[in-house]
């Protein structure tokens, strides 16, 4: 999986396989979205009360045409910002669309 995604997963696997570190329901919030032509900036916030969990996340960008792009990030901070270059401005963003976290 690491080879296909390019994301190092040791910390993710450790944090989710250690009983004290497994969240009952990690809370995630997508905010601070800024769209500058050709660039998307957003912030992911973990809202659970316990520890911060290290996890890969997907953010799906849906464009006005119905086409989508899936962005993959590694979230390991309580509040973490990301920036991407995009071909156009999305009309909608969806955090963790498959409910992995």
Image (spheres, rainbow, N blue to C red):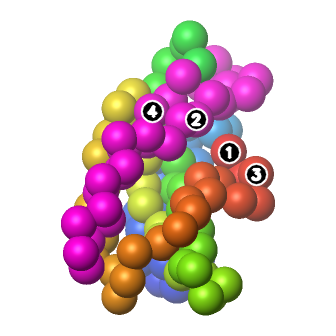
**Residues at discs 2 and 4 in contact (Cβ within 8 Å):** yes
**6 or 77: which is nearer to us?**
77
In the figure, 76 relative to 68: above or below? Answer: above
N-term-proximal mark, 4 vs 1: 4
**Residues at discs 1 and 2 in contact (Cβ within 8 Å):** yes
Query: Does residue 39 belong to the magenta stretch?
Result: yes
Q: Is residue 2 visible?
A: no
Q: Residue at x 35, y 41 (%)?
A: 32
Would you identify the image quadrant in which residue 85 lies?
bottom left
Residue topped by disc 2: 28
**Residues at discs 4 and 1 in contact (Cβ within 8 Å):** no
Q: Quadrant of the N terminus?
A: bottom right
> Where does the magenta region start and end?
19-47
Residue topped by disc 3: 99
Whole-number angstrom distance, CA of label 4 to CA of label 3: 16 Å
* Side (left or right) of 59 relative to 84: right
Residue topped by disc 4: 45
Q: Residue at x 31, y 62 (%)?
A: 35
**Residue 57 drawn at (x, y percent):** 54, 56
Q: Is residue 71 visible?
A: yes
N-term-proximal mark, 2 vs 4: 2
Circle 1 SS class: loop
**Residue 82 drawn at (x, y percent):** 30, 55
Residue topped by disc 1: 101
């Amino acid at each position: 999986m690491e080879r296909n995604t390019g994301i190092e997963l040791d910390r993710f696997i450790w944090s989710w396989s250690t009983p004290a570190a497994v969240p009952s329901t990690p809370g995630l919030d997508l905010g601070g979205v800024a769209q500058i032509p050709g660039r998307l900036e957003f912030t992911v916030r973990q809202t659970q009360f316990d520890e911060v969990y290290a996890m890969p996340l997907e953010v799906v960008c849906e464009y006005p045409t119905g086409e989508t792009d899936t962005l993959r990030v590694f979230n390991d901070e309580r509040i973490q910002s990301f920036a991407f270059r995009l071909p156009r401005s999305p009309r909608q963003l969806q955090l963790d669309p498959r409910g992995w976290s």
